[in-house]
Image: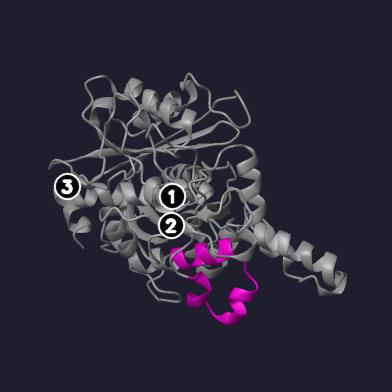
Amino acid sequence: MREIVITGLGATTPLGGSVPATWAALLAGRSGVSRLTQDWAQDLPCQIGAQAKADPAENLEPSQARHLDRSTQFALVAALEAWADAGYGLGDANQTDPDRLLVAIGSGIGGLNSLVSNWDVLRDRGPRRVSPFTIPMLMANAPAANVGLALAARAGVHSPVSACASSNEAIAIALDQLRWGRADIAVIGGAEAVIHPLPLVAFGQMQALSRRNDEPERASRPWDADRDGFVIGEGAAILVAETLEHARARQARIYGTLAGAGVSADSYDIVQPDPSGAGQRRAMEKAIADAGLAPGDIAHVNAHATSTPQGDTTEARSIRTVLGERSEAVVTGTKSMTGHLLGAAGALETVMTVLALRHRLVPPTINLDTPEPSLAIDIAAGAPRPLPAGDLAALNNSFGFGGHNVAIVVTTAHMTADFETAANG
């Protein structure tokens, strides 16, 4: 089986407009959640969100930004950062063969802002004022399609939609495609932008959102006994992954290995996870086996950990069951700082998992003041936690409405003599 390595990272998030800015804020335990100041938010039950730190439109040509939904703007900004981080530039002579370049970018909801805003235009100003770009802006595959266009990717452009598991499913799809030899390099991840009154009200009606309006930075609190729901976030995260042979040939810097993926479905409920955790466990077990590892090899878990009452408890129990009672894996919930980026969450947390292994430092879970009893997992609460030296493996979980479960395993680069040249290139 061809080994797949990670050579580029990009992100624009509630903590920063780049990967370095986001990583620094995570290690500092900084919250990206704030009180919404828009007029439309002032009468809503939930008035908080994790808004992106940087406006993506400021990094795009104005004429381009006008014709793109905010979710696609995020995807392009993060993808261009990852592409450059991998050592590429748009139009470079060293760019990979477009016929061997693949894109897979998921979004849980897609261009909701474009859909709703153009409905408002139709209602208030008539059909002639509706933008002719409405459909290309609102479609859920727009982030992937526009990144594919920007990079001239012709091996395939994929757009999985599986709620909050979408971007990790994109990573799983790309991993298979690279292993099967259908591409040499892939730009993969997710994007989401739905901080808008309709989702805030709709999620709120489901009792899914925190209403800690007076303390927004303390609202997202995974595993805390006083948690009352998640916080909607926005942004994008993108990785560049490629075959080891392709990375070696161009002497690419290597962050680590995209080692395995596991996918399952609960088939239990459209919203609630199966309380037994059986589907979550299957996804994790598949991912670990796909990586050729044993549960005891997992040193770190970036958990889905949305801060919902049932979800956090079920996942903690699933992690402990899969990894075993003697597991020393350090678990964290970075949504405590970023909020929940829905379809982009998995990719962002996979990026953070890669960096945790590279720097051997697990970002903290903040706001965990009173841990729920009997969690039986080792949570990095309040401060970063160091990881040991040597080869390491880590797990990232994403679970979505509809019962979608995706787990991704990443590892440090296996430092063989041949690999070391590529990894340090």
Helix, strand or loop under label 1: helix
Residue at 53% x, 56% y is: 155
Q: Nearer the viewer, mark 1 or mark 3?
A: 1
Disc 2 marks which residue?
238
Task: Residue 377: give x, y in percent of width and height.
Answer: 29, 28
* 7 versus 129 height, above or below: above
* 349 versus 248 height, above or below: above
* Magenta-colored stretch includes residue 64: yes
Which residue range is magenta in the image?
55-79
Disc 3 marks which residue?
415
Task: Residue 239: give x, y in percent of width and height.
Answer: 40, 56
Helix, strand or loop under label 3: loop
- Of residues 16 and 108, the one nearer the viewer is 16
- Of residues 225 and 317, the one nearer the viewer is 225
Which quadrant would the C terminus be assigned to in this image? bottom left
Disc 1 marks which residue?
347
**Measured Cα–Cα span from mark 1 to mark 3:** 25 Å
Q: Earlier in the sequence, mark 1 or mark 2?
A: 2
Q: Earlier in the sequence, mark 3 or mark 2?
A: 2
Q: Is residue 139 left or right of residue 302?
A: right
